[in-house]
Image (tube, grey):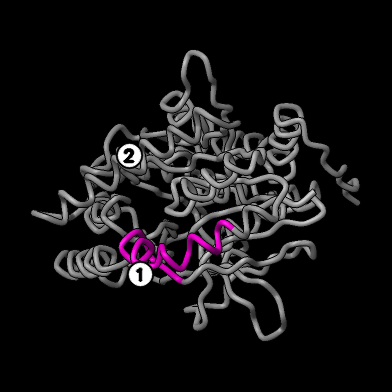
């Protein structure tokens, strides 16, 4: 049984022959599905000169069906005459199609799969329409982006209505379910059972080390962080924050510059560090060096996988009450939720975590329990059981873990 997966994360072949992905979260997802298939073929953009070491795909049955490199729709659609024949030939050669959406190539691959009578399933991981208010476009660019968003939303719903569909978190599940066609809720994750830490407390020394892991663009709410650091310092709490993640396109570069400029203007430049992208294999152990995780993200996501990664590392989490996040984090049980991504809200929540030891230790312990039920292995097993039953395909039985 050959599974074909189409997505937009860039891959490349390393000199050692390994197949690598820059961020690593998608590579781990592919690895989690690999035991259920004879072969997985990835139809993804490929790059020749990657900007980092990336994360290797560990499974030996994963192959690459390269598309031309593209950063987004503006680079994808001009290459469509080249991409479409490749997609057509590729879809013809797979047994089951899997689209992780939204992504530009998915509607075309899905249409080909329907034409060939191939079974397909989709995993919805983002909400483009919810992101519209945060996009920094003006004038004609804003009109074009709004039109593209509407096209993607209609195409995504068309796929969800005509296939087995999973969605990351309750918000996306509710959005895309229909009375006669229910979407299956899941949680995208990068953690294995062996990644779960054992520490029971943090914040035992000063400065308190805060961490944010996020792509840097206007949709992530990161501009509030310098002001939050300033407020915490004024409260007498010595803190630093490291922001890990790449800047995405011109808007991301502008956002990164604005964060650095605001930190300098407030006199906290030495406490706000923009570290850039870190490969997942290096990032997971890095989490354990920090005390508090903060994600002031804005609407438009499912459940950010970094929340589970930080919970797995024994870090209390402060996040916004948006999108699918409340379906993972229960306020004051396994994390703290703020209603709006403001500096004051973030600072007050972090101050609670730092000053209230019993609360902090309870959040950590309950977060471990949450993580244990949402490992890669557990989520893949649940998804593939539904895929096998709903699509009527015979999958391999994974070997038991040693």
Q: Nearer the viewer, residue 397 or 110?
A: 110
Please tell me which of labels 1 and 2 falls first in the chain.
1
Asked whether the beta carbons under mark 1 and mark 2 sit within 8 Å of each other, the answer is no
Q: Residue at x 67, y 86 (%)?
A: 15
Q: Which residue is mark 1?
A: 273
Distance of label 1 from label 2 (alpha carbons)? 25 Å
Q: Residue furthest top?
A: 179
Is 329 situated left or right of 395 in this image?
Answer: left
Q: Residue furthest left?
A: 139
Q: Nearer the viewer, residue 228 or 117?
A: 117
Q: Please say if 232 is above or below 130.
A: below
Element on which disc 1 rests: strand
Is 281 situated left or right of 76 in this image?
Answer: right
Which secondary structure dominates the residues rendered in magenta? Answer: helix
- Within 10 Å of disc 2 (Cα), the crowding (few <14, some 14-19, many 20+) is many
**Horizontal and vertical percent for residue 56?**
67, 69
Label ID, residue 362: none
Which range is magenta? 69-88
Is 273 situated left or right of 344 in this image?
Answer: right
Asked if one can make out residue 319 in the rendered structure from this viewpoint, the answer is no
Q: Mark 1 or mark 2: which is in front?
A: 2
- Within 10 Å of disc 1 (Cα), the crowding (few <14, some 14-19, many 20+) is some
Q: Which residue is mark 2?
A: 299
Q: Residue furthest bottom?
A: 15
Asked if one can make out residue 321 in the rendered structure from this viewpoint, the answer is yes
- Is residue 341 magenta-colored? no
């Amino acid at each position: 049984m050959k599974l074909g997966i189409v997505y937009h994360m860039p891959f490349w072949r390393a000199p050692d022959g390994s197949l690598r992905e820059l961020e690593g979260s998608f590579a781990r997802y592919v690895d989690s599905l690999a035991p259920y298939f004879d072969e997985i073929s990835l139809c993804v953009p490929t790059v020749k000169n990657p900007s980092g070491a990336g994360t290797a795909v560990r499974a030996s049955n994963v192959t690459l069906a390269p598309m031309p490199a593209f950063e987004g729709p503006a680079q994808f659609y001009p290459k469509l005459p080249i991409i479409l024949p490749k997609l057509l030939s590729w879809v013809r050669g797979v047994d089951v199609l899997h689209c992780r959406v939204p992504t530009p190539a998915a509607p075309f691959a899905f249409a080909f799969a329907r034409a060939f009578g191939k079974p397909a399933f989709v995993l919805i991981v983002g909400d483009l329409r919810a992101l519209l208010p945060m996009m920094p476009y003006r004038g004609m660019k804003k009109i074009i982006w709004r039109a593209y968003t509407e096209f993607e939303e209609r195409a995504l719903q068309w796929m969800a209505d005509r296939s087995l569909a999973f969605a990351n978190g309750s918000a996306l599940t509710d959005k895309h379910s229909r009375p006669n066609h229910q979407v299956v809720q899941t949680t995208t994750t990068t953690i294995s059972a062996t990644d779960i830490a054992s520490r029971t407390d943090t914040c035992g020394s000063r400065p308190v080390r805060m961490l944010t892991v996020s792509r840097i663009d206007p949709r992530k709410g990161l501009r509030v962080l310098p002001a939050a650091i300033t407020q915490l310092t004024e409260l007498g709490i010595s803190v630093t924050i490291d922001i890990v993640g790449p800047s995405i396109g011109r808007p991301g570069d502008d956002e990164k510059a604005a964060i650095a400029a605001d930190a300098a203007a407030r006199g906290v430049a030495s406490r706000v560090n923009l570290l850039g992208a870190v490969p997942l294999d290096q990032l997971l152990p890095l989490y354990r060096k920090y005390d508090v995780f903060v994600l002031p993200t804005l609407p438009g996501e499912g459940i950010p996988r970094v929340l589970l990664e930080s919970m797995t590392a024994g870090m209390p989490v402060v996040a916004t009450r948006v999108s699918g996040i409340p379906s993972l984090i229960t306020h004051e049980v396994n994390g703290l939720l703020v209603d709006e991504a403001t500096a004051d809200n973030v600072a007050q929540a972090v101050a609670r975590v730092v000053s209230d030891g019993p609360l902090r230790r309870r959040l950590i312990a309950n977060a471990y329990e949450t993580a244990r039920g949402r490992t890669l292995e557990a989520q893949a097993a649940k998804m593939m059981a539904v895929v096998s039953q709903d699509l009527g395909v015979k999958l391999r039985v994974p070997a038991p873990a040693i």
